[in-house]
Image (tube, rainbow, N blue to C red):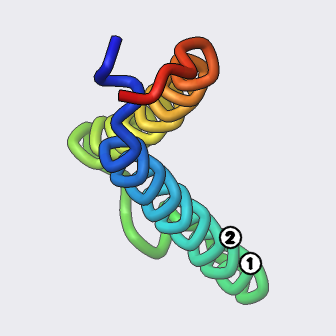
Amino acid sequence: MKYWNNTEAMSWLRAFAFAFTSVMLAMGYVGYRMDTALKSVGMTAEEFYGPSSIGEELFAYLMVAVWIVSVVLYLYGKFMQKRHKTVS
């Protein structure tokens, strides 16, 4: 179980999870602001952009799945680090 004591791998995973979470939050905020702006002029997103394609929907689900996997891997790595405190 020496792999879980690799702090460099954990720091890269932590950085990826943090960066991806930040991007997801920023995209959510931009979407919220655009939705609010469209509602203020009496439009919906479908009226403004047109109907969304299946590719856009799948891409959004894929991004959420990648985010969930990165956070779960990070938390699992932290759990394994605490469980195996041996330092090589």
Whether residue 66 can be seen here? yes
Residue, disc 2:
32
Q: Are the residues tagged 2 and 1 within 8 Å (C-beta)?
A: yes
Q: Is residue 20 above or below residue 86?
A: below
Residue 88's place in the image compared with 84, above or below, is below
Q: Residues within 10 Å of mark 1 (few under 14, many from 20)?
A: some
Q: Nearer the viewer, residue 75 or 41?
A: 75
Q: Residue at x 45, y 64 (%)?
A: 19
Which residue is depicted at the point 63% across and 22% down? 82
Above or below, 44 against 75 in this view is below
Read off the residue under disc 1: 36
24 on left or right of 49: right
Under circle 1, the secondary element is helix
* Residue that sits furthest to the left in the current view: 55
Tell me the tag on residue 23: none
Residue located 47% across and 50% down the image = 14
Q: CA distance from mark 2 to mark 1?
A: 6 Å
| Outermost residue toward the front in this view | 88
**What amino acid type should be assigned to the residue bearing mark 1?**
Thr
**In which image quadrant can residue 15 be found?**
bottom left
Quarter of the image with the N terminus is top left
